[in-house]
Image (cartoon, rainbow, N blue to C red):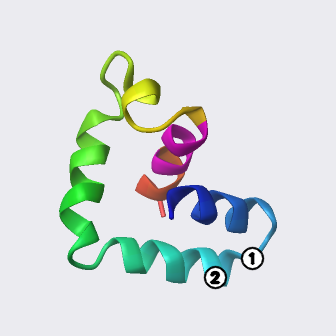
């Protein structure tokens, strides 16, 4: 879903991206999302979290 969020943002579909992010912020995804936020700055985070695309999406979503 984070990859989809980023693709929607990149394609200018911010309303759909916001809906996607809001869904991630709801249970049961919220706990996982917050754990991922805590891991963003850890060494090797891009490997653990699913690659650089996911890492960038997490960074983008933190400010949203």
As drawn, 42 above or below 18: above
The residue at 59%/55% (across/down) is 3
Residue at 34%, 27% (x, y): give it. Answer: 41
Q: Secondary structure at mark 1?
A: loop
Few, some or many residues within 10 Å of mark 2 (<14, 14–19, 20+): some
Q: Is residue 42 above or below residue 59?
A: above
Q: Which residue is mark 2?
A: 16
Between residue 50 and residue 58, name the one nearer to us: 50
Q: CA distance from mark 1 to mark 2?
A: 6 Å
Q: Is residue 32 left or right of residue 48?
A: left
List the residue tagged with mark 1: 13
Which region of the structure is painted magenta?
53-58
Q: Percent position (x, y) of residue 21?
A: 46, 72
> Which corner quadrant of the image does residue 25 belong to?
bottom left
Do callouts 1 and 2 mark residues in contact (Cβ within 8 Å)? yes
Crowd band around label 1 with a 10 angstrom C-alpha radius: few (<14), some (14–19), many (20+): few
Q: Position of residue 37 (x, y in %)?
A: 30, 46
């Amino acid at each position: 879903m984070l990859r989809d969020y980023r693709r929607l943002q990149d394609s200018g579909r911010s309303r759909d991206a916001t809906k996607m992010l809001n869904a991630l912020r709801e249970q049961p995804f919220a706990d996982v999302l917050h754990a991922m936020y805590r891991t963003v700055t850890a060494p090797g985070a891009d490997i653990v979290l699913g690659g650089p695309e996911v890492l960038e999406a997490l960074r983008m979503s933190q400010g949203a």
